[in-house]
Amino acid sequence: MVASKPRRRPTSLAPQTDAFLTGNEVAALSVKQMDIHLMGFYPITPSTEIAELLDEMRAEGEHRIVMVAADGEHGAAGLCYGASLTGARVFNATSSQGLLYALEQLPVQSGTRYPMLLDLVTRTISGPLDIRGDHSDLYFTLNAGWVTLLARDPQAVYDLNIAAYRIGEHSKVRLPVIVAYDGFFTSHQKRRLKVFSRDDDVRAFLGPVPGTITAVDPRNPVTIGPYMNDPDLINNKYQQKLAMDAALRVIPEVFAEYARISGRSYPVVDAYLMEDAEVAVFLLNSAAETAKDVADRLRGEGVRAGVISPNVIRPFPATELRAQLRHVRALVIGERADASGAHGANLSHELKSALKDDLENRTLCLSRIYGLGGKDFYAEDAEAFFRLAIEAAAAGRVAVPFDFHGVTATVAGSSTARVLPPLTKREAAPGLVKVRRDEATGALEVKAPPAWQMATRAKRVAPGHGACPGCGIFSGLDQFFKGIEGDVVVLYQTGCAMVTTTGYPYSSHRVTYIHNLFQNGAATLSGLVEAFLERQRRGELPADEDITFVMVTGDGGMDIGMGSAIGTALRNHRLIIIEYDNQGYMNTGSQLSYSTPLGHMTTTSHVGPAEHGKATHHKDTLQIMAATNMPYVFSAVEAFPDDILRKAAKAQWYARNEGTVYGKLLISCPLNWRADDRIGLDVVQAAVDCCFFPLYEVETGKTHLTYDPDEVGRRVPVGDWLALMGKTRHLAQPEYAAELRSLEAEVERRWQGLKAKHAHPLL
Ligand SMILES: Cc1ncc(C[n+]2csc(CCOP(=O)(O)OP(=O)(O)O)c2C)c(N)n1
Ligand code: SF4
Ligand SMILES: [Mg+2]
């Protein structure tokens, strides 16, 4: 049960405090106050902050919610589903691709009728990738069977989050609930608001979790999620429909009860100046607030303007909307998402069909798509909508029923013209690096000039990218690519390397570059390679076109994209996967990845009295990939340039002749490692010298150490490496001694294991 001493539900105004918070901040506060059991999450802008803030509070001992950093949103949704099956109160927050990656889990949650809360901080979906806010992600949930509440401002985020569990857990409803609010507009803008002064009042409003069928009651075994064909499945869906019908009755009841303790009411449909409106606009969330100001102004000019915007879209409040629109002559339905090819997005069609059921209704409807990709919606845009409605009302007809608003033929100052010429054949293949297989021993011999002599070789990534000062990504990648002769096609998964090189309309890449979502890059490149080779075999592409295909990923991409990378390796496609490991999800704000070592501080593994940084050891990705039996696996760092060069050349040989290659580069991230940006190489060198990051290769199954700090007398304690970074300095303090000892022991265990393999002729 949630509260230690369940209190009676309050029925009168509870004490409240003024606060000045963003949507994300107040979302985190509401979750903390509710004392739910578990949050499963995976970082994605703009919702990440909620987990970060909750983790920070947990480190300070301010709550006891179990925070689980998943391997991706699919995993996070699975974690939440599993947790909800125990009868626990469960929470998740996501956006955009994260939501889409979790999508298949959503109907499972609703179809088996296990309530939970998901804060959807809305953001545009790829592609192309855009981190700003529109409702294209939200629209994918409309058929998922979740109750969906819309929070137009941070106050509503707080209030609706608290109301959500009561709605979802109601015995007649038993459905999961989404609270959706606008990415950046609401998630990141501070607003004055009120919050309950005592957590207990929030907990008392929620009450204990209602008893339910759970997966953890051995005396009452149940089958959750049976295999169900016809004739039963349609009945299951009908029950979900009845639950949605019930939600339409329950939501106003819960909102009314909430109004009694908070003083704030949420009608199912927010109707502004609608009593006598002749023209109106229908908008979701923050844009509606902009339109209200414009309606006020138009009223001053004698126009009977109103704004209608739902607080609930699932169940769709058709009756309430019909009632509000009865006397409206013309309505513009503005939507921040398109349903491409459907001549209007989803809510336009739903609203129009709701009106059609009212035989008396004569409202003329115009549907307009606006604000995609986070394009701002200003008062002028709202006014343009009202003018459209005024024109239609005057003409008595709709000239253009559906269109986009705010599209421009060109963007001033924007050009896609090439800035840098592509690499010439000679620049791509200067013939400096040569690899030969010794047929007698099977060993590869690499001939290459020393790395310093390669300094003048043309770079495949041009200078002028947007990475932070001292970032090791591009110098590390450049060293790797210097060992590759000939043309390359690169595929970058999402991460710092991608976002800092391809801000439209510019690209730093002088070779063909592809981006795909970072859980699927390896599969994408597999398909590309296979089709390229097949088209060559069919004579459709020149047989002598020799391209090396390289996927570039961060360590985070090797969490969420692990399945795709392993699948690629098991199929043994001829390509190279190169991971730059900066020990965290850096471009989203330094959250932990599974490669983050024990005790390290990140924004989702805080350091405080109740949390000592990351709680588990770093993933041994090299060994995982080596276990797929791919022909070549290696580790390398920038501090050993000749070593990288040699390994790159071998990687290319194996990718050309035998199959998949995986290489991991440890690269420095001065920003999030909190290290001086001039000492990146020293930090990486220390990571190697303390044996945290051993340099080795696994070549056709055989492990070779390529550098042994013990042998050359350069071994340093793990603590020396940790002392170089702000994110780990705490580990030198006595209260973190257990973490330091554990990390040292793990480093030593893995190092000795590698040494043993190196020494053994078969391993
Ligand atoms: C499905 C999905 N979930 C989450 C994100 C948000 N996201 C983009 S990049 C990234 C982290 C990348 O980490 P890593 O691969 O280590 O690269 P780095 O940022 O450190 O360079 C995350 C979480 C996303 N784009 N798509
Ligand atoms: S956050 Fe770190 S990895 Fe990303 S660009 Fe900056 S220094 Fe490089
Ligand atoms: Mg990373």
Image (tube, grey):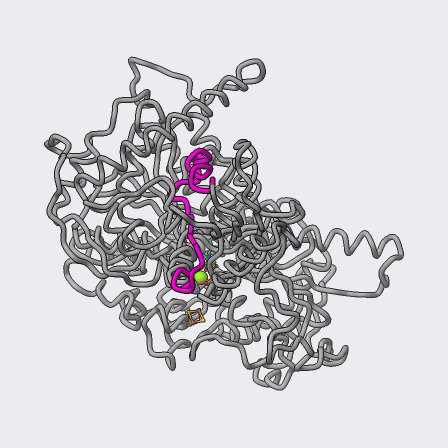
Q: Is residue 28 above or below residue 108?
A: below
Who's the residue at 72% across and 67% down the image?
A: 436
Residue 8: quarter of image: top left
Classify residue 696 as left or right of residue 296. Answer: right
**Which residue is nearer to you in this view: 488 or 707?**
488
Q: Position of residue 275 (x, y in %)?
A: 38, 46
Task: Evaluate whether residue 41 shows in this view.
Answer: no
Q: Position of residue 581 (x, y in %)?
A: 46, 62
Classify residue 12 as left or right of residue 229. Answer: left
Q: Is residue 217 above or below residue 86?
A: above
Say if the magenta span includes residue 302.
yes
Residue range (magenta): 297-326
**Which residue is nearer to you in this view: 172 or 230?**
172
Q: Is residue 164 above or below residue 468?
A: above
**Which residue is nearer to you in this view: 417 or 308?**
308
* Image quadrant where one finds the N terminus: top left
Q: Position of residue 538 (x, y in %)?
A: 88, 53
